[in-house]
Image (tube, grey):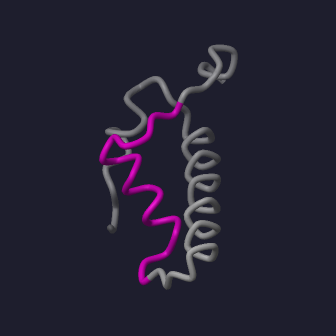
Amino acid sequence: MLNADLNKVLKGKTSRYSLVIATAKRARRIAEEAEENNEIIVEKPVTLALDEFLEGKYEIVEPEEIRDL
């Protein structure tokens, strides 16, 4: 996945900061699950995590206080 359309994920209500944090947390979990199951991941966990957000498998929910920062 190169140059993903981040507007699909951001949808005008999610900050880029929240996207980065959510992607990092999900990527860490993907890597942990693969290690627990002794699986080998071909793609990078960050790419897999961002793909999941783009496909709508996960939604980023952020507090209203930080949406307009």
Is residue 20 found left or right of 3 in the rendered image?
right
- Relative height, residue 18 to residue 65 (above, below): below
Residue 52 locus on image (x, y percent) = 39, 52
Q: Residue at x 51, y 81 (%)?
A: 39
- Relative height, residue 30 to residue 5 (above, below): below
Q: What stretch is highlighted in magenta?
A: 42-60
Instruction: Judge whether residue 48 is colored magenta.
Output: yes
Residue 8 locus on image (x, y percent) = 32, 39
Q: Which of 11 and 36 is in front in this view?
A: 36
Q: Residue at x 64, y 68 (%)?
A: 32
Q: Residue at x 57, y 54 (%)?
A: 26
Is residue 55 found left or right of 52 in the rendered image?
left
Q: Nearer the viewer, residue 49 or 7?
A: 49
Instruction: Judge whether residue 50 is colored magenta.
Output: yes
Looking at the rendered structure, the number of numbered marks drawn on it comes to 0
Residue 20 locus on image (x, y percent) = 59, 49
Which quarter of the figure has residue 30? bottom right
- Relative height, residue 24 to residue 65 (above, below): below
Classify the position of the N terminus by image quarter: bottom left
Classify the position of the C terminus by image quarter: top right
